[in-house]
Amino acid sequence: MRVYKTNEIKNIALLGSAGSGKTTLAESMLFESGVIKRRGTVEGKNTVSDYFPVEQEYGYSVFSTVFNVEWNNKKLNIIDCPGSDDFVGGAITALNVTDQALVLINGQYGPEVGTQNIFRYTEKLKKPVIFLINQLDRENCDFDSVMAQMKEIYGQKCVQVQYPIATGPGFNSLIDVLLMKKYSWKPEGGAPIIEDIPAEEMDKAKELHAALVEAAAENDEALMEKFFMEEALTEDEMREGIRKGLVTRGIFPVFCVCGGKSMGVRRLMEFLGNVVPFVSDMPKMRNTRGEEVAADSTAPTSVYFFKTGMEPHIGEVSYFKVMSGTLKTGADLTNADRSSKERIASINVCAGANRQPVEELCAGDIGCTVKLKDVKTGNTLNDKDVEHRFDFIKYPNSKYSRAVKAVNESDTEKMMAALTRMRQEDPTWVVEQSKELKQIIVHGQGEFHLRTLKWRMENNEKIQIKYEEPKIPYRETITKAARADYRHKKQSGGAGQFGEVHLIVEPYAEGMPDPTAYKFGGQEYRMNIKNKEEIDLEWGGKLVFINSVVGGAIDARFMPAILKGIMARMEQGPLTGSYARDVRVIVYDGKMHPVDSNELSFMLAARQAFAEAFKNAGPKILEPIYDLEVFVPSDYMGDVMSDLQGRRALIMGMDSEAGYQKLSAKIPLKELSSYSIALSSLTGGRASFSTKFASYELVPTDIQTELIKQHEAEASEEE
């Protein structure tokens, strides 16, 4: 393969809901461009894209697949992305490293919730969008209805470039209103027959052609001026107008394809080669310092690694984009994230599992390499004259979590190593070793996401694992002030131990005034603050520690030990053993011994005094509350709301967005445990949701009682 210059390269993400036909379309694109001689099928498990065993097992794309085709002396790098919302990480990665989104729509169903989610990401990243309506040969495909839905959702920016003469099993022809030609195919597909538009279709074609001309003209002042004068543009002028409109998201062209029979695919490839923006047409990327980095092949070399694949017999395959400069085989580069040196021994361009070696790749190009020493997903390698780092890919929060453990405990270390490797492949798998919960938690995008991980662990890694319900990270706090004291005294020959601590605890709220006096049992305790520490707890909330000891009752050198004892008890609240938070502690008195007092004595005394005071201060359990947004078709709204109310959710509002209802709520984390499964079941997989931590709130009394009983039972079992 020859070396393509930056202004000859186009990077494209192929996106769409599950079942929209992306893998089949990718196969047709590879076939039409001559990369493969025969089209594979998903059913035959022989496609270029879905080549991993887990994908062939489930019949779904799990990983994004990078491939390239040459068309009209242009290089098109295409990333075929999984359609399931559970594997959205692949789509987000692809959108960040490409310059054009091809969004596939199933002609039977129109824009689905997965389409909406993908479109929101293209909006956020300001990526051009071309819509492809696929599967026009299906019985219940209604093209006009799909176009009406798209206009309603995406507005008048949706402009038809093509329309089918008829849909259903007999689909074999379409009208192209950019070229003003009729394209038709034999039943088995193949090369199109290109003819003049028949008389009965001419009025409709002219009307849509005029709309396309106007939409193209709107993106360029000179073209708009010509349009007003002549009401016409040449084909080249229309292409230029559409290209500029794509870059600014001023136009969303709509094409028709039937990927299964390769109908319309060759014409689509022509449009991609002729009209879609080049890398050099798009806004410059920014590094972590906010500096613009131009895709300039003469600049110092900088390479960003956006994906890692694990392949049998090969190991890690590292996929990269050349951000600047020209990457050559044998280049010695520095890892900006890990300060290590790397030699690029080989450079390949990809077509799924097939790789073709090349000597160099220019800025903007995408390739892969193998056998790197110390490169992880998200790392940047630089030439000696540049210090770029890139961190532009942001993944959504997890939606589904499970505690994971190896069935055979001796496999735990191997399991953790495998989980770490898998996270390199899919950063939306998040692995957490929770000291608090004493569990290994795997967070993902949904039940299917974690089921896939389990399949791979058991079939590829040969490690049997099991999932359990994750524990909830409850918190404990207090609701009133309380006082306690404790004397630690121990004598066992030689130096003894002695420490006595008197303290007061009370709930802490941001901005509350310093204490002056307290009253307990008819006795007043006046405070004389000598020192105050505000500690931001790593698990959230604060501990405010005040030294109000007067008259030298406790030497100042013992205060750190007293604080240490209190912190130790904060890590294990008396109700459920959960972390405590938002507490103010005032040490106001105590006693010490000139010989026997030491740090250990005061630490133990403080720990016991704090525990006693905490129990008498109206302790309460707090639970994590999350903000929840659900995108749901209107006809399922009632069922979804009823389900949420049964999960102790508080509905905060409803709104319409792009043809769907957006429901906002606050919901306890405990009730989110299996929500992705329930929502999918309620809506037939047509809804999606996102969550974000909001706050900790008091649990209802009946649940608190149940949690305390459960903790006591577990504690007695351990004894």
Image (spheres, rainbow, N blue to C red):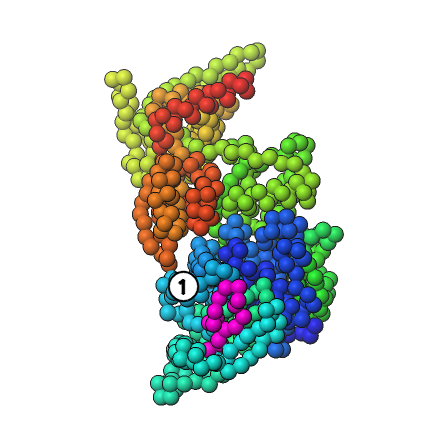
Where disc 1 sits, the SS reads helix
Q: How many marks?
A: 1
Taking depth in this image into account, of 215 and 136 the one nearest to the observer is 136
Q: Quadrant of the N terminus?
A: bottom right
Q: Is residue 651 above or below residue 96?
A: above
Q: Is residue 508 above or below residue 207?
A: above
Tell me where residue 555 appears, x and y as whole percent: 43, 25
Left or right of 664 on screen, residue 517: left
**Residue at position x 50%, y 60% in the image:** 139
Left or right of 408 on screen, residue 707: left
Which stretch appears magenta? Answer: 163-177
Taking depth in this image into account, of 646 and 546 the one nearest to the observer is 646
Tell me where residue 128 appears, x and y as whole percent: 47, 68
Q: Is residue 336 in view from this perspective?
A: no
Q: Is residue 468 in view from this perspective?
A: yes
Tell me where residue 258 appears, x and y as whole percent: 55, 66
Q: Quadrant of the C terminus?
A: top right
